[in-house]
Amino acid sequence: MDELKVLKALSNETRLQIFKWLKEPTANFEPQSHSLSTNNFIGGVCVASIKKKVGLSQSTVSNYLSLLHESGLLEAKNIGQWTYYRRNQEAVEKLADWIKIDL
């Protein structure tokens, strides 16, 4: 885990909020149109749903999600023409351990 990339990804209020919302996707987003259980991506949320909730442009939301994904905090999967994102729980646990041990 690149700690600086992770901290940078979370240093923006909107990116941090998206990351928090993805902790409980069914509570924070409308039901997803694709069967994510069939595609082995339970908890994934479509970029369009995130854009709708955030209220920013598609390009801005995509950029924010890319930064979170590149930091390792999110996993992404393309299903048809849509990209879905979910939290990478393993990375979250590593981040928590890093904060507890090294900070």
Image: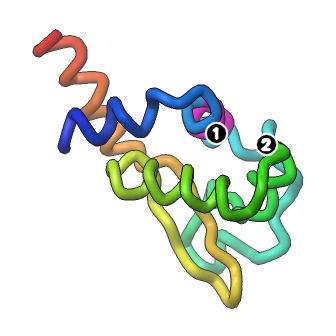
Q: Which residue is mark 2?
A: 54
Residue 95 in picture, x, y percent from top left: 28, 30
| Membership of 12 in magenta stretch | no
| Labels 1 and 2 touching (C-beta < 8 A) | yes
Q: Which residue is mark 1?
A: 18
Q: Is residue 33 left or right of residue 35?
A: right
Residue 37 sits above or below residue 44 on the image: below
Amino acid type of the residue that numbered disc 1 sits on in the rendered structure:
Ile
Residue 42 in picture, x, y percent from top left: 61, 61
Q: Is residue 46 left or right of residue 101?
A: right
Q: Main secondary structure of the magenta part?
A: helix
Pair 1/2: label in front: 2
Q: How many marks?
A: 2
- Which image quarter: residue 57? bottom right
Residue 20 sits above or below residue 58 on the image: above
The residue most toward the bottom is 80
Q: Which residues are magenta?
A: 17-21
